[in-house]
Image: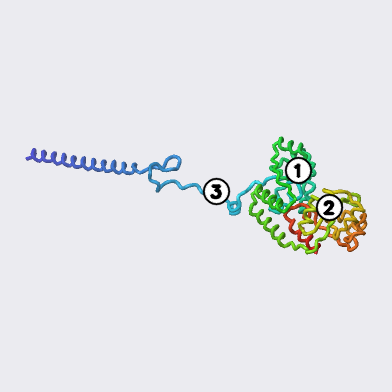
Amino acid sequence: MKISLNIESRRGDRTLRAMALRWTCALTLAAVVCGCSKQSKPQPSALGTKAGPDKTTSAPAPAPAKVSETAAKEPKQVKQKLITLGGSITETVFALGSGDSIIAVDVSSVFPPKVHQLPKVGYHRQLSAEGVISLSPDLVLGSTAVGPPKVVAQLKEAGINLVQVNDEKTIEGTRKRIAAIAKILGKQSEGKALIDSLDQDMKAVKQSTEVKKVLFIYARGAGAVSVAGQKTAADAMIRLAGGVNAVQEYEGYKPINAESIVSAAPDLILLTTRGLKSIGGADGVSKLKGVSLTPAGKNKNILAIDDLMLLGFGPRTGKALRQLAEALK
């Protein structure tokens, strides 16, 4: 009986040990499975980005750089450095809205008043290459009258970007010149507006039914007075306004001559404002040789118009013609 119980006791112990072993194995397997499950999840890399295709746990993107509202609306532009040669060229560039780009002008550039604050590089027909080259311009803009040819060649050899436009003293030439300059500067819409304004002024010119003779006197002081003949800018303006040049005998300009002035018998004497000032105003004109004996001198019929407006064939040419035509009525 004791033996039987002892055997049963040992069997019971083995059973308990077997059951304990099975539980231990089960618990161990469960732990392994749980561990594998945890390790299968993608882990962040050392660079802070996530391995694997799952993008839900990717690192946040860096914040974009801050840009001011002004900078976003108005991108920075590099302004060209311009040198303009010739009064009408300079005036046109200003009228197109590009005057702030001009760093120097020639001495014939007298309008608008701001040009008097700019450096001068000589007269556009008698330039010195050194003065232009020393300023390192991005663009030199002038007419076909720029010279002398030797200097033009020197500028081009030095790598200066010299662009020349027509120098025609006609209304059509003015239109073409404005359009050409506007295209060069990328101001086509502004150029069209200037041409439209010129055309409107031309339409407003009311010519007199009575043709009157006009004498244009070019003065730079009492000792430097000459009279305009045919094929001059003054002659062209007189004809466009409906008048006739009182001098028909020669082309270009000649010094004043009392006998010629008397025989010309002008109805109107025309000058530039600077010319009139240089000889002492209307009283100074009356003292010029032969003038007091002409119809214009006797009636004090004297007209002065801004230099570039009258002779420059630029953006204000139409306004000058309106003034002149009004004086001829």
**Residue under the point 10% across and 38% down:** 7
Mark 2 or mark 3, which is nearer the start of the sequence? 3
**Residue under the point 80% across and 41% down:** 126
110 or 271, which lies in front?
271
Q: Amino acid at mark 2?
A: Gln
* Number of residues whose C-alpha sits closer than 10 Å to that of mark 3, classed few (under 14), some (14–19) or many (20 or more): few
Q: Which mark is residue 65?
A: 3
User: Residue 315's x, y, as percent?
Assistant: 72, 55
295 or 123, which lies in front?
295
User: Residue 223's x, y, as percent?
Assistant: 91, 50
**CA separation in Å, label 3 and label 2:** 74 Å
For label 2, the residue is 248
Q: Left or right? Give the position of 284 relative to 179.
A: right
Question: Is mark 3 in CB contact (under 8 Å) with mark 2?
Answer: no
**CA separation in Å, label 1 and label 2:** 29 Å
- Single out the mark in the foreground, 3 or 1: 1
Question: Is mark 3 in CB contact (under 8 Å) with mark 1?
Answer: no
Q: Amino acid at mark 1?
A: Val
Mark 2 or mark 1, which is nearer the start of the sequence? 1
> Quick one: SS at disc 3?
loop
* Number of residues whose C-alpha sits closer than 10 Å to that of mark 2, classed few (under 14), some (14–19) or many (20 or more): few
- Single out the mark in the foreground, 3 or 2: 2
Q: Which mark is residue 146?
A: 1
